[in-house]
């Protein structure tokens, strides 16, 4: 099974590197002085790795949220985290500070990270009231926050000029456009942290998948461990969304499909979910790049189209 996931990853990776508006010449991609080599190493390779890591983070975060709240509809997107990041980025764009940066990190990235962090911790403190009750109310809290952020965002649209409105709109669609490896390095740090925490707490995740009472009777400090998981998820998702913008439904589609196919406990599907999420977003990014259009279609549109259908399917099945 591990060999299958590895071969699938390599196949999708190779296809993704060969897809793009510019057709690369295989005879020139290994020549460091050629344009083909620069496109491959500075544009496509970083983008493909960013797509894989982004999908992996989103899917694994979705699985962790669903396990913590025992609800298949709980994801960073449905909880309003992406809306918080978008609002933070919009503040920077509206105030004309989008060109500023600190230590190579743009103000848009910094403020969207803060927006995502604020939303996550707001949800955490609200969730403490619901953690032993109906988590459907927590989903409603996330939806309410999303509506609130959308209302503020509409005010920003009204107050902004054409250029600022376009920047905000493009950010809200989600994008994997990147040049070089700096952004990729930041996302990589978030990925390593999320993977480490997920496997370190895999026994705890298995216990709470049964019930919180079961974990408590085992002598586990449930609240402390959940807080640790929240910090790791908030850091990883905050970094990711601040760089790529909101990419919806990956955390909903992938964990659901992996659980349907494998039918195993959560500790056994952590890595399959991680890899499947990366492969899924690589596939969506490939579709976004080959669609006929004047400019490249943002990957967030493709994931939303697929995810929206799966979302309705889950609602009907429940």
Image (cartoon, grey):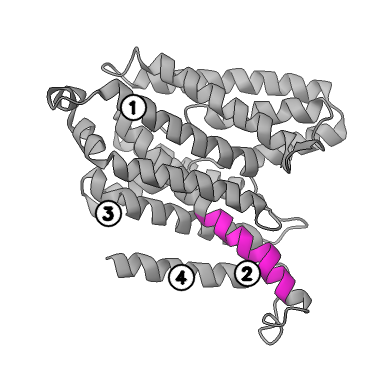
Q: Which residue is mark 3?
A: 261
Q: Is residue 315 left or right of residue 117?
A: left
In this view, the residue in front, 57 or 172, is 57
* Residue 276 quadrant: bottom left
Provide residue 204's location: percent of width, then percent of height. 24, 35
**Residue at x 83% of width, y 25% of height:** 160
**Residue 246 visible, this angle:** no
Provide residue 215's location: percent of width, then percent of height. 18, 27
Which residues, given as a range, are shown in magenta? 37-52
Frontmost of labels 3 and 1 is 1
Q: Which residue is mark 4?
A: 10
Q: Which residue is mark 1?
A: 226
Q: Which residue is mark 2?
A: 19
Q: Secondary structure at mark 3?
A: helix
Tell me the distance, in whole angstroms, between the alpha carbons under discs 4 and 1.
34 Å
**Residue 58 versus residue 81 in the image, above or below:** below
Mark 2 Cα-neighbour bin, 10 Å: few <14, some 14–19, many ≥20 = some
Queried whether the magenta region covers residue 202, the answer comes back as no
Q: Are marks 3 and 1 in contact (CB under 8 Å)?
A: no
**Residue at x 82% of width, y 25% of height:** 95
Provide residue 22's location: percent of width, then percent of height. 73, 71
Q: Is residue 35 left or right of residue 82?
A: right
């Amino acid at each position: 099974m591990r060999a299958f996931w590895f071969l699938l990853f390599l196949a999708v990776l190779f296809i993704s590197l060969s897809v793009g508006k510019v057709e690369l010449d295989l005879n020139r991609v290994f020549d460091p002085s050629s344009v083909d080599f620069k496109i491959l190493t500075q544009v496509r390779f970083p983008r493909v790795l960013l797509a894989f890591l982004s999908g992996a983070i989103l899917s694994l975060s979705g699985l962790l949220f669903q396990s913590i709240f025992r609800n298949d509809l709980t994801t960073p997107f449905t909880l309003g985290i992406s809306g918080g990041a978008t609002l933070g980025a919009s503040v920077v764009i509206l105030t004309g500070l989008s060109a500023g940066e600190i230590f190579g990190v743009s103000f848009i990235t910094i403020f969207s990270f803060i927006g995502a962090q604020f939303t996550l911790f707001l949800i955490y403190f609200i969730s403490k009231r619901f953690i032993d009750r109906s988590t459907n109310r927590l989903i409603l809290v996330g939806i309410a926050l999303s509506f609130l952020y959308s209302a503020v965002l509409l005010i920003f649209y009204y107050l902004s000029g054409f250029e600022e409105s376009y920047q905000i709109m493009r950010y809200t669609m989600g994008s994997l456009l990147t040049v070089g490896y700096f952004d990729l390095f930041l996302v990589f740090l978030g990925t390593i942290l999320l993977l480490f925490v997920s496997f370190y707490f895999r026994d705890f995740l298995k216990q709470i998948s049964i019930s919180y009472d079961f974990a408590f009777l085992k002598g586990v400090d449930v609240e402390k461990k959940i807080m640790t998981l929240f910090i790791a998820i908030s850091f990883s998702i905050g970094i990711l969304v601040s760089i790529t913008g909101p990419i919806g439904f990956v955390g909903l589609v992938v964990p659901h499909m992996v659980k349907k196919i494998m039918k195993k406990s959560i500790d056994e599907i952590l890595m399959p979910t991680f890899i499947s999420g990366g492969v899924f977003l690589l596939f969506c990014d490939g579709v976004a790049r080959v669609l006929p259009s004047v400019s490249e279609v943002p990957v967030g549109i493709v994931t939303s189209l697929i995810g929206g259908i799966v979302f309705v399917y889950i609602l009907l099945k429940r």
